[in-house]
Image (cartoon, rainbow, N blue to C red):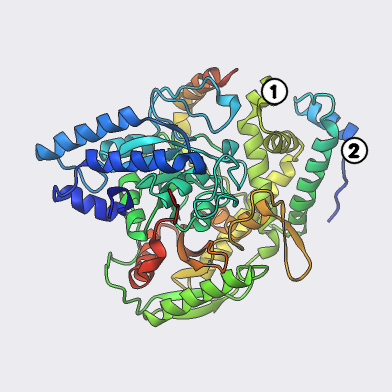
Amino acid sequence: MRPYELTLADAAKAIASRELSPVELTDSVLGRIEAVEGRLGAYVAVFADAARHTAARAERDIAAGGYRGPLHGVPMGLKDLIDVAGLPTTASSRVREHHVAVRDSAVAARLRDAGAVLLGKTHTHEFAYGLTTPQSRNAWAADRVAGGSSGGSAVAVAAGAATFALGTDTGGSIRVPSALNGVVGLKPTYGLVSRHGVTSLSWSLDHVGPITRTVADAELVLAALVGPDPSDRAALGEPPTGHPRRTDADLTGLRVGVPRNYYFERVAPEVAEAVHSAIVHLGELGAELVAVDIPMTKYIQATQWGLMVPEATAYHEGTLRSSPELYAPDVRVLLEAGELVLAGDYLRAQRSRTLMRRAWAELFTAVDVIAAPAVTSTAARSDQQTVEWPDGTMESVSDTYVRLSAPANITGLPSLSLPVGLDSAGLPIGMQLIGRPLGEATILRTGRAYETTRESVSRLAPIAV
Amino acid sequence: MTTADLSPDEAARWALRAGLPLEAGRPDTVAATANHIQNVIAVLRELDFGETAPAATYQAAYAADALPDAVAGAEERADAAV
């Protein structure tokens, strides 16, 4: 096995035991980037020399007895909404052409402290306002969308062009590209990970989280990211809670909610079948499967849009007036139209969020985890605009990608996407595990139990070079 | 539930009222998108909120820290201006 093929957990073990050097690992991943980047377009910029320099320093520090933990000497990518001091944060937009970040974002600083090696900045759908990331191509099929908005991060991890990456998630932007590229994405509880220094799409819905090859890897990255941050007014400053950390795959005593409505409606049959099969497997591992009804489903899209659209427009107020022509057409028109949303409608969305949070809290008195498809369908063709469902309804690709993600953004609940198989076209399918607020330990334990008993689901995308 | 679509001229006037003069050729597409957004959001008017307070996200304890953020934001905007 070549170093770029290693999961984060395996690479960390090898580095800790001095079987693998950070330089060797970083060189291998940089070589992989060189081999696949031309066809994938995952990165806005790769900083190869700086990465080698950081890796060499990590190697020296570790040799001198200064091992910092599992991220030390491990190469990673950051979605290009995340500030790194002295580097541009382009947001994959011409609007940011001359931008240079003044200081590190909180998450970049934490990863730096943990000894991680920055490879480069990965593509986002412009300013995270979209679900496809047109600059990048799906790691499993070049004619399919990467998903978004953290498309570059998910593609890079799926291809072995980063050992892990960070993304952001406002309406599914970590979980959707993770599901479509067969990797793991974690949207933590709202406020658990600081967003200071991360370009916002919608303040009240934005989250930062890891994209990794395995659930075990996501747990390692999350541990490095959490903690109080006075710079982020929403930061909780509390560690995740839940079941005590267990490494066995026995799920006895865990109650897994299986939605009777919403999450399996207008879902591709192969996706529904794969996720149902994965849920049955959780039952075989000892979990109790409990049928649940998802509340207020009629109001999910309205609440998501009622919050996101005016908040996004407010964030871009200055540049929408000074240089509107620099935005891509799809983003520009959404920002302009957002000026016309009434304050009364924004408040209704906020009040609806109050009701929805209460209703979901009630739901979690009966279950510990809710298991559902992460996305309604596998990756769409790059030129595809809509999805047609068997009931005759049409849905835009963006709407269908947000549909199953939005509840966890509105409520702030943690949600983990993990691969559970491939469809008949060979495209990855993702399952979503949603937990209580700060219930990361429970959804990660559930996901880990699944992946350790279904090893084959966490392999790299098969890219011929 | 009641809502009313905006014509392109009305969309341009509403945008101007919000402080955004729309360039020539923009009102048609902006009106169409704004009407679509409004049709999605308007369903919330069916809900009986009673005494329900809005769930905003900022914690009052941090409100006093607003100044450093505002300064950092000004630097970012200067960098972003093209």
Q: What is the x, y in percent for residue B40? A: 75, 52
Determine which of the numbered discs, if any, sits on residue A341 in the image: none
Residue on which disc 2 sits: B7
Residue B51, given in percent of the width and then of the height, sits at 66, 55
On the question of residue A435 being in view, the answer is no
Q: Going by the image, does A378 lie left or right of A251?
A: right
Residue A69 x, y percent position in the rendering: 21, 46
Question: Under tag 1, what secondary structure?
Answer: helix
Quadrant where the N terminus of chain A sits is bottom left
**Front-lying residue, A218 or A313:** A218
Q: In the figure, A68 relative to A10: above or below?
A: above
**Does residue A59 appear left or right of residue A121 in this picture?**
left
Which numbered marker is on residue A321? 1
Amino acid type, callout 1: Arg
Taking depth in this image into account, of A28 and A420 the one nearest to the observer is A28
On what subunit does the disc labeled 2 rest? B
Residue at the spot x=42%, y=44% of the render? A166
Mark 1 packing: few (<14 Cα in 10 Å), some, or many (20+)?
Answer: some
Is residue A398 visible from the viewing direction of this image?
A: yes
Query: Where residue A258 appears, x then y in whole percent?
Result: 53, 75
